[in-house]
Amino acid sequence: MTTGRERFVAQIEKAAERTDIMPQDEVKRFIRRACVHLRILHNELAAPLPPQTDRKRADRA
């Protein structure tokens, strides 16, 4: 089963191939949607670390 991230990447790749034939408003909508998904992925990756990891990092400092 594919993850949401893999599906998203596949959608971007597929849509990028046809942006030259897409109407301009559809391209804009696609870009806005991609930005929303990228923001969500960024927030997932920027989530705070578990407390144990934070303690280890503080010990090294």
Image (cartoon, rainbow, N blue to C red):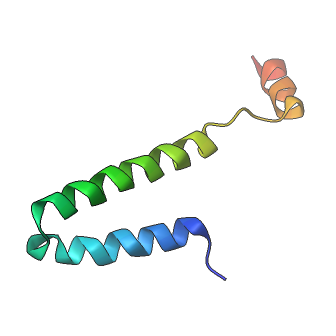
- Give how far across and how far down residue 46 sits, in percent: 61, 37
- Give how far across and how far down residue 57 sits, in percent: 78, 26
Q: Is residue 45 left or right of residue 31?
A: right
Q: Residue at x 37, y 48 (%)?
A: 35
Q: Residue at x 24, y 70 (%)?
A: 16
**In the displayed structure, would residue 23 be above or below residue 32?**
below
Q: Nearer the viewer, residue 26 or 21?
A: 26
- Give how far across and how far down residue 39 sits, in percent: 47, 43
Extreme residue in the bottom direction: 1
Looking at the rendered structure, the number of numbered marks drawn on it comes to 0
Q: Residue at x 89, y 32 (%)?
A: 52
Q: Is residue 11 left or right of residue 44?
A: left
Which quadrant: the N terminus?
bottom right
**In the displayed structure, would residue 47 be above or below residue 25?**
above
- Give how far across and how far down residue 42 sits, in percent: 52, 43
Q: Is residue 44 left or right of residue 20?
A: right
Q: Nearer the viewer, residue 55 or 61?
A: 55
Q: Residue at x 75, y 16 (%)?
A: 61
Residue 54: image quadrant is: top right
Q: Nearer the viewer, residue 53 or 36?
A: 36
**In the displayed structure, would residue 17 be above or below residue 57?**
below
Q: Is residue 18 left or right of residue 57?
A: left
Residue 17: image quadrant is: bottom left
